[in-house]
Structure formats: C-alpha cells, structure tokens
C-alpha cells in the first residue's frame, strides 16, 4: 500500500475536479452545476437528469472514475479485462460477470476460488433478480463432531461446506447468458495455463496465507498448488497453474456439471473421505443454487436491495432503516455527530443480525419483521446522541472476498460477489485440481438452540453480500441506479451503508465515496477508524465513549468496494484504492 495516499491531515487532501467529455453524457449544464459542489446546485443538476453528485475529490486517491457505456469493475485488473473481453465479443453484462468471476479464481486466489460460494443481484428486464449460490453443510454431518464452546476450526475439513460458486456461474448463464459458456470461461483458462503476472496486493496476501497453512499434512496440496517452488509468488512474478486450467476447462465443457456429478465431483468426495469429512458425492449432486426475491428498504428515495438470509445484507438495511429516523443530511458528511449515529445504528443492526440470521428454514423472526418501520423506530430510540453504548452486537470476524460489477449498453447491470471466506479458505486443496475449498461452516454458531446452530444440510450465516440500488422515476417506474458492493467479512454491510449514504445524503461521486475513510465496529465499544478524517474527530469520538483504534493507513480490512452508477447514457465506474483493481470500459 502506497503511504503517500494515506495522509490523514485533511489540510493536505487533494481537491481535484474531473472535467471531461463526460459532460455531454450527463448534460453540460447539469455537469457544471454538479461540479460547483453546492448542495442547491447539485440538486438542480439532479432535477435536470444528471448524476446526483458532484465531481470533487476531497480524499487522497489512486483512482479516477471511468465513464463508458459498457463497464467492468473489480479488485484485480486482469479479471476486469476478462469481463471486458467478453463484452467486446458480444456478450452481455451477465456473461461478463461470469467471465470475471472465473478469472478471479485464478488471478486473485487469495480471496476466492473454484471451491467458493457466490451471490448475485442482476438488473434485467425491468427488475432486480437475486441469486443465492451458497452451499449447505454435509447431509450426513454429525452435530457431535463439534463442541458447544469455542468455534469451528478455520483450517482443515471441519470448516468446509458444499462449494456453490460453479453452480452460480452455470445458473447465471442458463437464465441470462448469451455467449457459449465455454467461450465465457476461456479467459480464465488462458490465465491459468499461460500464466499471469501477480499484482502487489495479491502477492502480499498470498505470502501471509503461506504462514497459515503449516503443520498438518492436509495442507501439502495447498503448497504443491500455490507455492510449488517452496515460496509464494512476489509482485510481478509469472504464475501458472495447469491443474487449475484443466479444472476450469472441464467446468467450461460441461457447464459445471463435472464439478457436481462427474470426475471432479469424485475427486472432491474422495479427498473429503480421506480427510475425515462428511462431505460426499451425494452433497455435491444434491446441491442447487436458488433464485430468490431480494429484500430492500427505502432510504430517502434510494432503495437498497440485498440478498435475503442466509446472507447478512439485512444488516445494512436495518442500519439504514434506523438512520432514516434522523436528519442525517443536515449533518456535515464527516462530522462527529454523523459518524456517531452511523456507528450506533450499525451496532444495533449487528445485534439483530447475529441473533436472528440463519438458514431461512430455521429463522424464528422474519426479515419483514426486522425491517418493520415501527420496529426500526424503536431501535432508533435506543441511540443516545451523547454516549456510545454496547448493544451486545457480537464479535465481527475477518473475511476474504472478491466483488465485481458489470454493466452493458443494453441496460443490464450485475453485482456479483464470490468468496472462500478467509483468504484461500480452509487450506484444503483437492490434489491435482487447483480447487481450494472454502471454510463457510465457520460462520455457524455452536450455541445450542441458536437458529444458526451448526447442523446437517443447513445453510450457514453468510457474510458475502452484493448490493444494488434503484429509484422511482417521474413516471412511477423503478429504475436502476447503482450496482455495487464492499467486500470483507463483517465490514460488508457497514461498507454498504457508508457508501450509499455518502452518495444519497452528501452527493459524493462514486469514486469519492469509495476513497473516503471508513470506520468499522468491533466488540463492545471498540471501533476502528481509518486515517483521513479531521484530527479532532478521533478525540471527539473518544469523548463520546467510543474506544477508537486508528490504523496507520486505509487498508483492505475496511473493505474493497466497486461501483457502477447509471447515467442518462452510459455509466460511471469506480474501483477501491484498497485493492489492485480498476474499472474498465468502452
């Protein structure tokens, strides 16, 4: 991470104004008015049909927004180019999302892999579609395998559930795909077989992973696959994986069936049996992704859509539902008053989420009840504007995730998220395949009777959440506004709320909303706050009772976001400086 981009002195923050030919796409008068930065002028621009934000850049950054009619944004540049290649070949945004996701398993294996789960929100044919491709615990799982204390081990077979990612690619293609599936997976196969140059942040997390997967023979296939010369690749090194390429080729030729029913399924089941896992061919063949109805909430005319439980997207909705009870727009964007209310609302949201979110067949309280306005008002009433409180919101855990978003000139937009959970996941790699298995079972609870208690054939609480925003236009129709997400374990709903509020309440453009410093809540009164806020902000938050921790720089633990925002004719794409990625378009 380049420290020059992480100066926390507000007086030295750059204030660059981006003026380009994009003025023509949003309307010259609207663009100029928005660029002036006053709230009244920005609202005037919004009324004229332009983007409802200004193009000031008040935070230090390594990125500029990309304006185009076709865009891909993700955390690794080569994967973004894979999606763009598919768009140029005549594919749609859904094809591009699959291509990018498959490529990310190769070029960013530190956060996802073929053994991942994934979720998606798709805007097509006038509405938002939700895809849940998470996997279940083994059908024959013995609950007594786990104690009632501590937590499920992150590493080894105990944390592995049925991988759903490949089924998500296939389901997306079956419903929306235009190009042949084999053609869509082709860029990923090429990166794996011919090799790719490892990017800096990926290299850093790759090295960290190697220190985790030691001391047990179960990790030998990981080292054979991802550190074949006895070390992990450094930034700029060429890395190839023939096994990964062969596996992707088999998936491509069978539209994923080989992974769940064929030779690959057999190899996974054999490795599981050898490792003492209950995961079997029956689990793989029984697995099925599900198209689900998204849940949503209106936040001052902006409707945020999330995947329903077993995902934690509802935490972002609860937080925003609480915050809409306050006049947030009247507060300064980075003021202590604003940050305090956001932090307290997020703690309340996590208290509800960690108590209730689980496999939907096992939940005791419905999402609708948690989003009821009277309930949200009662939760908002618990916030003391003058004092931080402990709402028993639990202990947020780490994560490792990739988020991509795509949009095409036809108006299709996709928010797609894919993850092994913690880095490479469980550390289990199926020999000779390049398949790194996730450790999603670690998100189960061991508390007896809890809705999310670990059990056979159950979906675990899931941290990864894509995001999508719509609005109602003047004719009363719902229209797409923004496909986005902020990756990173329990940071994700916190990031969704923070980014959306910056755009909705304070008219920040997508790149600035991502560049801005973030906060994240931890256990009790602990809050970590990135550098970049005014110096006095940190002391003022401490005076309210927050136990503030301040890292040296903005970093990936605060999430790595991607945004595509709809303009009148095309899109604005933005990519987070906390990752290697970029937005690309044409």
Image (cartoon, rainbow, N blue to C red):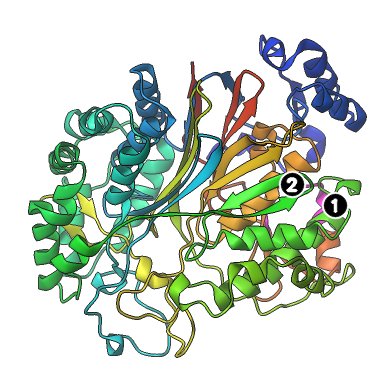
Q: Is residue 583 above or below residue 119?
A: above
Magenta range is 529-538
Q: Is residue 534 magenta?
A: yes
Disc tally is: 2
Residue annotated with mark 1: 328
Q: Is the C-beta separation of discs 1 and 2 under 8 Å? A: yes
Disc sitting over residue 465 in the figure: none
Q: Is residue 319 above or below residue 562?
A: below
Q: Position of residue 435 (x, y in %)?
A: 21, 52
Residue annotated with mark 2: 501
Which residue does the image show at 32% across and 38% down from the upper left?
Answer: 173
Q: Is residue 113 visible?
A: no
Which residue does the image show at 20% across and 62% down from the upper left?
Answer: 284
Q: Quadrant for residue 156, please give it.
A: bottom left
In the image, 69: left or right of 316? left
Per the image, label 2 sits on a secondary structure element best described as helix
Q: Position of residue 85 (x, y in %)?
A: 35, 21
How far apart are labels 1 and 2 at the CA level? 9 Å
Q: Is residue 392 magenta?
A: no
């Amino acid at each position: 991470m380049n420290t020059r981009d992480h100066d926390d002195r507000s007086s030295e923050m750059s204030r660059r104004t981006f003026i380009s030919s994009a003025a023509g796409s949003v309307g010259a008068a609207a663009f100029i008015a928005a660029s002036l930065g006053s709230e009244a002028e920005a609202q005037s621009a919004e009324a004229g049909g332009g983007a409802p934000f200004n193009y000031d850049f008040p935070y230090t950054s390594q990125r500029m927004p990309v304006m185009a009619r076709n865009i891909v944004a993700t955390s690794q540049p080569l994967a973004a180019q894979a999606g763009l290649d598919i768009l140029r070949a005549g594919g749609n945004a859904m094809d591009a999302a699959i291509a990018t996701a498959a490529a990310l398993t190769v070029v960013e294996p530190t956060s996802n892999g073929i053994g991942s789960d994934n979720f998606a929100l798709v805007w097509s044919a006038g509405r938002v579609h939700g895809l849940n491709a998470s996997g279940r615990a083994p059908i024959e799982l013995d609950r007594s395998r786990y104690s009632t204390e501590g937590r499920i081990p992150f590493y080894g077979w105990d944390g592995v559930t049925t991988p759903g990612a490949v089924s998500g690619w296939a389901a997306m293609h079956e419903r929306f795909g235009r190009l042949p599936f084999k053609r869509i997976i082709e860029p990923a196969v090429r990166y794996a077989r011919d090799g790719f140059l490892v990017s800096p942040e990926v290299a850093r997390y790759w090295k960290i992973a190697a220190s985790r997967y030691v001391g047990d023979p179960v990790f030998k296939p990981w080292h054979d696959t991802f550190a074949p010369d006895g070390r992990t690749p450094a930034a700029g090194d060429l890395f190839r994986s023939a096994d990964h390429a062969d596996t992707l080729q088999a998936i491509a030729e069978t539209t994923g069936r080989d992974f769940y029913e064929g030779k690959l399924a057999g190899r996974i089941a054999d490795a599981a049996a050898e490792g003492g896992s209950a995961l079997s061919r029956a689990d793989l063949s029984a697995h099925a992704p599900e198209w689900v109805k998204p849940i949503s909430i209106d936040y001052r005319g902006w409707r945020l859509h999330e995947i329903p439980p077993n995902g934690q997207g509802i935490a972002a909705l609860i937080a925003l539902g609480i915050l809409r009870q306050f006049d947030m727009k009247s507060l300064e964007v980075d003021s202590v008053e604003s940050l305090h209310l956001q932090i307290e609302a997020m703690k309340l949201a996590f208290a509800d989420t960690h108590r209730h979110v689980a496999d939907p067949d096992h939940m005791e309280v419905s999402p609708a009840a948690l989003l009821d306005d009277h309930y949200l008002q009662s939760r908002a009433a618990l916030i003391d504007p003058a004092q931080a409180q402990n709402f028993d919101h639990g202990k947020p855990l780490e994560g490792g995730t990739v988020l991509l978003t795509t949009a095409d000139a036809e108006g299709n937009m996709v928010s797609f998220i894919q993850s092994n959970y913690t880095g490479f996941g469980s550390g289990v790699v199926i020999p000779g395949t390049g398949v790194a298995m996730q450790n999603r079972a670690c998100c189960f609870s061991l508390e007896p009777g809890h809705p999310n208690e670990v059990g056979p054939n159950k979906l675990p609480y899931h941290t990864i959440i894509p995001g999508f925003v719509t609005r109602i236009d003047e004719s009363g129709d719902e229209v797409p506004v923004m496909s986005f997400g902020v990756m990173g374990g329990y940071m994700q709903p916190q990031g969704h709320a923070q980014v959306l509020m910056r755009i909705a309440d304070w008219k920040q453009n997508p790149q600035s909303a991502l560049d801005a410093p973030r906060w994240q809540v931890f256990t009790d009164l602990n809050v970590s706050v990135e550098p970049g806020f005014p110096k006095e902000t940190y002391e003022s938050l401490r005076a309210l009772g927050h136990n503030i921790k301040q890292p040296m720089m903005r970093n990936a633990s605060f999430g790595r976001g991607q945004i595509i925002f709809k303009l009148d004719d095309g899109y604005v794409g933005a990519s987070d400086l906390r990752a290697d990625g970029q937005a690309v378009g044409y």
